[in-house]
Image (cartoon, rainbow, N blue to C red):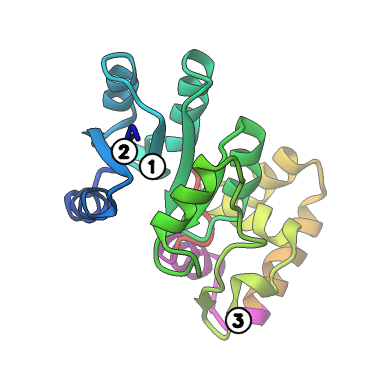
Amino acid sequence: MRKINVIIVDDQYMARQLFELYIKSSGRYQLAGTASSGQQALSLVQAVSADLILMDILMPDGENGLETAARIKAIRPWIRIIAVTSMAEASWLKRAREIGIESFWYKESSKETILEVMDCTMNGDSVYPDQPPKVKLGLSSNTEFTQRELEVLRLMTRGMSNSSIAGELGISENTVKSHIQHMLDKTGYKNRTELAIEARIRGIVVSIP
């Protein structure tokens, strides 16, 4: 039986080495190549035969693995892709589905192993978590925030003012202030700057191109 050719796309050397180890020990998969950036991945898929890609989402210089996956789907639609991340950014699940990415795997918190997700994906199944992993944020966690609060928080991490956030979301500035105050009350943080910094550090909201 022909082994399944896998490309690993991850900017972290240790992550690539770990995935390589899993692939080589599986007996079912073989490494077709590795890339540490989206641009390298695009070049690689055009140079080698690949059946499956393990695609990290957040890469160097804010590079977006999801958009790289979309570009790959446009030129090699038969290649199956598993989005891989350790970040709890909720919007990435929706975006991955929109692109047509077959499966989504959280590095630290998924109950399935990466090989189990690879097997399911290559068997034609789609593996997606119901929601991002729970991440502590002050006295609260990401799972206790509303969708709108997360949208406001995501724009806050870009350094946007309340008025700019209001314009972006089509709501009043007072509503923005109310959402921020609710988040401060939930988390116990002193101000919006502390809230935004801690949320970004923990990967709860991550803005990438």
**Residue 208 seen in the figure:** no
Q: Which mark is residue 140?
A: 3
Disc 2 residue type? Val
Q: Under tag 1, what secondary structure?
A: strand
Q: How many marks?
A: 3
Disc 1 residue type? Leu
**Residue 75 seen in the figure:** yes
Q: Is residue 189 magenta?
A: yes
Residue position marked by numbered label 1 in the rendering: 54
- Neighbor class of circle 2 (other Cα within 10 Å; few <14, some 14-19, many 20+) is many
Measure the C-alpha gap from mark 3 to mark 1: 32 Å
Measure the C-alpha gap from mark 1 to mark 2: 6 Å
The quarter of the displayed image where residue 145 is located: bottom right
| CB contact under 8 Å: marks 3 and 1 | no
Q: Is residue 127 magenta?
A: no
**Magenta segment boundaries in residue numbering:** 185-202
Residue position marked by numbered label 2 in the rendering: 9
